[in-house]
Image (spheres, helix red, strand yellow):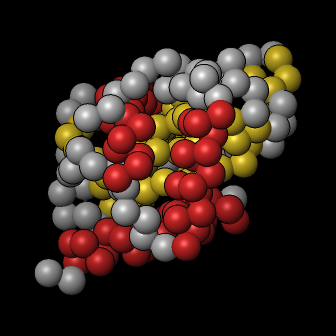
Amino acid sequence: MEWVDLIRKYNPYNGQEEKDKELILHCIDIFDDILTRENKIAHITSSAFIVNKAKDKVLMVHHNIYNSWSWVGGHADGEKDLLAVAIKEAKEETGIKNVRPISCEIFSLDILTVLGHIKRGEYVSPHLHLSVTYLVEADEEELLSVKADENSDVKWIPIDEVNTYSNEPHMQKVYAKLISKIFLRFKEK
């Protein structure tokens, strides 16, 4: 199934996802470079929310630019297989070798605002990340490593403490939503 069709068929979890899905699809319709950073206004990114087998911990990185604990992810950079992007980013940013999708379906859709910042010595203007998130699992015993150009630490955080580690209020809302979806899907069975 084409990446656009995966977004079209995604069933929004709440009003935020409904509105974000609508805007993401609108951006896909009006921009022909939405999969690349050539689009300076908005572009597709893919994130991995990495949980352990028990789904009681999340693997997070301390992000250099935002100086906060965060999930992993990155730009599609022309790649249409957004799950592959999320898995590649999970491996690159944490050092883990074995990552498996809990589902090949999209777990969350979010539009994330990116403030202007310096990256590799150059200013990057404010823009939007049209974030497609996948829920993936990894072994918490696996060796972790820092990707020094992007993060300064990597660790497993108890799922109920994720928002005490993040100092980004807009991301705390995203993490709270993701965690509530995990509890609905796995913890109440």
Q: What is the tally of numbered marks visible in this picture?
A: 0
Q: Position of residue 50 (x, y in %)?
A: 34, 49
Instruction: Report the residue at 22% width, 78% height from top.
Output: 187
The C terminus: image quadrant: bottom left
Q: Observer-nearest residue: 42 or 172?
A: 42
Task: Find residue 86 and report its image quarter.
Answer: top left
- Residue 170 vertical position relative to residue 2 in the rendered view, above or below: below
Q: Observer-nearest residue: 172 or 125?
A: 125
Instruction: Report the residue at 21% width, 83% height from top.
Output: 188
Is residue 65 toward the left or the right of residue 6 in the image? right
Q: Position of residue 174 (x, y in %)?
A: 55, 63
Q: Position of residue 112 (x, y in %)?
A: 65, 50
Q: Position of residue 137 (x, y in %)?
A: 24, 48
Instruction: Report the residue at 81% width, 37% height from top.
Output: 126
Residue sitting farthest toward the front: 29
- Residue 78 vertical position relative to residue 50 in the rendered view, above or below: above
- Residue 23 vertical position relative to residue 16 in the rendered view, above or below: above
Task: Find residue 53 and report its image quarter.
Answer: bottom left
- Residue 90 vertical position relative to residue 108 in the rendered view, above or below: above
Query: Is residue 69 visible from the viewing direction of this image?
Result: no
The N terminus: image quadrant: top left
Q: Observer-nearest residue: 158 or 3?
A: 3
Is residue 115 toward the left or the right of residue 48 in the image? right
Instruction: Report the residue at 55% width, 45% height from top.
Output: 25
Q: Observer-nearest residue: 9 or 166?
A: 9
Query: Is residue 135 visible from the viewing direction of this image?
Result: yes
Residue sitting farthest toward the bottom: 188
Residue sitting farthest toward the left: 189
